[in-house]
Image (cartoon, rainbow, N blue to C red):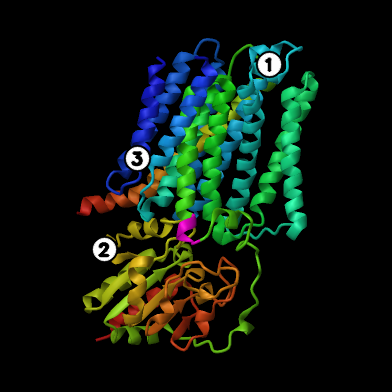
Amino acid sequence: MDSTFLLIFTFAIASLLGFELINKVPPTLHTPLMSGSNAISGITVVGALLCARSGEGLLSQLLAFLAIVFATINVVGGYVVTDRMLAAFKKKGKEK
Amino acid sequence: MVYLYLLATLLFVVGIKRLTSVKTCRQGNRISELGMLVAIVAVLAISGDGANWWIIVAGLLVGAGAGAYIARITKTTQMPEMVAALNGFGGVASALVAMAFLLIDPLLKDPDRSLIDTGLVNAISTPATILIGMVTLTGSFVAYFKLAGKKMAHPLSGAQRHMLHAALALGAIALGTWQVLTGSHTAMTVATILLALVAAALGVFLVMPIGGADMPVVVSLLNSYSGIAGAAAGFVINNPLLVVVGALVGTSGLILTQIMCKAMNRSLGNVLLGGMGEETVAKDAKDYKSIKSTTPEEVAMLLDGASSCIFVPGYGLAVAQAQHVVRELADLLQKRGCQVRYAIHPVAGRMPGHMNVLLAESDVPYDQLWEMDRINSDFKNTDVVIVVGANDVVNPAAREQTGPIAGMPILDVDQARTVVVIKRSLAPGYAGIKNPLFDLDNCLMVFLDAKEALEGMVKEVKDLK
């Protein structure tokens, strides 16, 4: 099997998994969930890192650098914001 | 080493799953953070040879510093728009990856080769990533400004507007096709730049006409887009991790979008076409006939005789940072033997669940938070309802057959014996329309800042004996 087919295959299975994963969410968690999955969408940082090759032209290096910066802002900012949202729930847990 | 990709994926799946339950959500976020760390380590370990470490280290440091700084200075009330902005950054990163790879792809180093020679799927993925990524970027930032309360009106209306959108979409497809098929690398570069610009314009114009009240749905949808852009970038650079995780975020975002639409009793198509969204600016206070204004002192006297009270918190409460005072008042009333509950509309605040986060922050007990469906039939047996900075979610105009918010489920506060509305002015809410509730005989208005009004009530209730 060629690699493109495998990619399409994994894409299809992962999509189905995504549909099934979150069919039930308490409304309380809608915003944290959106924020948490937003942080995960920063996974594109992986692609950005792969583009930072030495020996390439200046323009591609610049594009790769910007991609890494923006994706990392998405990842780190997303996780910190989500954590702050969820911190409110932790306090509750301790009380109980 | 490639097994680290599998490990990262599993950590993301478990993390997302745990994020959907109150008990495990914090742990879930930690697991997903770990997944991201594993993913980054894995990709560096696998492709470390020939990597430009200066760029990698500098990029990660700058990004992490900026991200952590932005996230820390964000106030709790501003978190929804912050999610929108962060999402835009993710989108543009994917688009940049696709553009950078055009310069890196070994096959394209040969000037006689065109993008289509890299294989159909990879070739199509390049313009798709740029298109979706740029739409996500500009759309998210328009959503950011709208959530921050800035008004932005679409320059065109009606059929002209749809024609502009169709023209931009067709233009993007044409440019994408040109980018894929052209044999000249100069033409490919031109097509890439034009495509990015057209897509950016499309993102702006698509989100512009959508009304502020629908923005949560838009942000959720754009969140899904940034996942899909990531997956598409995965096809461009042939990376399975990017494809899998992008697809996961893409589809789970779609489900969340659907859940939100359901909460507002609207179809996604309706939202996107801007049905409710038209920013019809409401007429001013002269529209109201019989407004009765009152003071915190009088409300305290009203509460003295009340045996049941329901608070309806809205965005105004969040802006005034009044969540702690509201709890203080609730505790006082409870000590006096009054039953206290909070009615939470599915889209109270700016996002579903936003209000729960704010109230949890001030330690409001969970069992006092009632969702709309559970509490709506109880309003008619309630003595006093206090609406704090909410407007559209208690607007009886939603029960009409027509009108901008027709069909949106609302909290039936007008059925309570007395409704007290704390609101700074008669200005229209987020949906920009008049609220007939204020004209009703059983409705009293307190024209003060939410915190000021509630503090006044706390003081007066304490003085009651």
What residue do we see at 34% from left, 68% from top? B342
What residue is disc 2 on? B367
What residue do we see at 49% from left, 52% from top? B80
Q: Distance of mark 1 from mark 2, alpha carbons?
A: 61 Å
Q: Chain of mark 2?
A: B
What residue is disc 3 on? B17
Three-letter amino acid code of the residue under disc 3: Lys
What residue do we see at 59% from left, 15% from top? A53
Q: Distance of mark 3 from mark 2, alpha carbons?
A: 24 Å
Mark 1 or 3: the one toward you: 1
State the SS at label 1: helix
What residue is disc 1 on? B117
Query: B26 or B15, which is in the foreground?
Result: B15
Residue B465 against residue A71 in the figure, above or below: below
Label 1 vs 3, first from the N-terminus: 3
Task: State yes or no: residue A39 in magenta.
Answer: no
- The span picked out in magenta is B261-265
**Residue closest to the far left:** A96
- Asked if the residue under mark 2 is in contact with the one under mark 3, i.e. CB atoms within 8 Å, the reply is no
The disc label shown at residue B136, or none: none
State the SS at label 3: helix
- Asked if the residue under mark 3 is in contact with the one under mark 1, i.e. CB atoms within 8 Å, the reply is no
Label 1 vs 2, first from the N-terminus: 1
Three-letter amino acid code of the residue under disc 2: Asp
Residue A63 placement, left or right of B347: right
Magenta region, main secondary structure: helix
Q: Residues within 10 Å of mark 1 (few under 14, many from 20)?
A: few
Q: Chain of mark 3?
A: B
Task: State yes or no: residue B264 in magenta.
Answer: yes
The N terminus of chain B sits in image quarter = top left
Three-letter amino acid code of the residue under disc 1: Asp
